[in-house]
Amino acid sequence: MNSQLLNSATWQHGEVRLVCVERWHETHDVISYRFQAEQPVKFQFKPGQFITLLLDINGERVGRSYTISSSPSRPYSIVLTIKTISDGLVSNYLADHLQVGHRILATGPDGVFNLVDIETEKYLFLSAGSGITPMYSMCRWLEDTQKGSDIAFLHSAKSPRDLIFHADLKQFDNVNEHFNLAYSLEEGELQDGTAVVEGRFSVEWLANQVADYQSRTIFVCGPAPYMQAVKSALIEAGFDMERYYQESFGGEPTSTVNQAAEQEAKPFMLHISDKKVDLSAEQSLLEGIEKLGLPIIAACRAGVCGACKCKVVKGEVESSSQMALTPEEIEQGFVLACSTQLRSDALVEL
């Protein structure tokens, strides 16, 4: 078995069947799942990327994207760390049903929020809640491959019992003199010497903990309100937003469509293979693809995860998000179906 692992193929992208080999609670409502491939592979991905789980729940195919919390420097398994949300269909399904030995289908990895596509020398990680997962993968990668990396890590949580990965992060803080760990907690405190401030994120707290934050590259991940607050505060503080990167999952796209105008506007024709459907200028490609009953995974439906990527072969479109696409993919005509509308009749390939 050892020789089989050492000589196993490298998985870089595509569908893979995973076997759950371990699961454990990080906190009272956060569970980590460790997977190996059904056929031994070495997992190659960029620290910060995600995979999309493809599940059958109550007779329906459901896809959800989750950041890989482990590091590609430890390539024989991958770990997903998932917060159980009260009304979360997939997170509750996994918590209740996914046990050691169970198999699951996944696709990926995807995402441009990573340490390969974004290069820098001085890191500032800002996260809240389960948004810590890509930051932990990045930290583990840096600690495994580039000892002594200059990292400032500021995480926000409700209380000490909600801190994810604290033991490992504290170890990084202890052994790397250039690693600076601090928390903002809404309530409670820690007894191990870690810097803690009561309350939520503020630029004043940031400047107090990381005096040179203006010269760093900032990576941000967390709930939408947290992300909005951080971004607004940094803009107001005069931070160079060319060095600001964020990642977020969840949330339904909102629409302010004038329905009367939509009804009057002439629809465009979407062609996919031998099928076609009319779409208004306000409807997304994803809506058309789903109307046609064609297979597509739409994990976030907010232009973030990249699972609904497709290629526009002919016609004009307008996209509100290209977050999960590389410059090469954009040049080749790839778009995110959930965030793209027709501006003419179009031919699309899935």
Image (cartoon, rainbow, N blue to C red):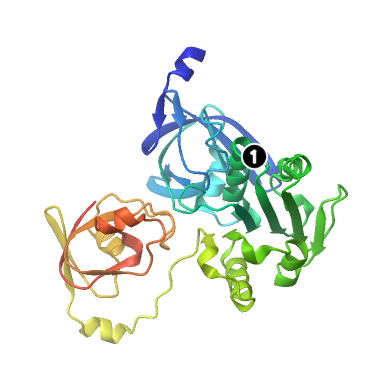
Q: Is residue 309 visible?
A: no
Q: Which amino acid type is shown beneath numbered disc 1?
A: Glu
The residue at the point 41 percent across, 60 percent down is: 323
Q: Which corner quadrant of the image does residue 300 belong to?
A: bottom left
126 relative to 208 in the view: left or right: left
Q: Is residue 73 above or below residue 183?
A: above
Q: Is residue 256 above or below residue 270?
A: below
331 relative to 13 in the view: left or right: left
Q: Is residue 127 above or below residue 254?
A: above
Residue 191 placed where, x, y %?
Answer: 88, 49
Q: Is residue 323 visible?
A: yes
Q: Which residue is mark 1?
A: 143
Give the secondary structure at mark 1. helix
Pick the residue in front: 106 or 278. Answer: 106
Residue 202 placed where, x, y %?
Answer: 71, 70
Q: Which corner quadrant of the image does residue 291 belong to?
A: bottom left
The residue at the point 54 percent across, 42 percent down is: 94
How packed mark 1 is, by other alpha carbons closer than 10 Å (few <14, some 14-19, many 20 or more), is some
Residue 220 placed where, x, y %?
Answer: 58, 60
Residue 325 placed where, x, y %?
Answer: 36, 56
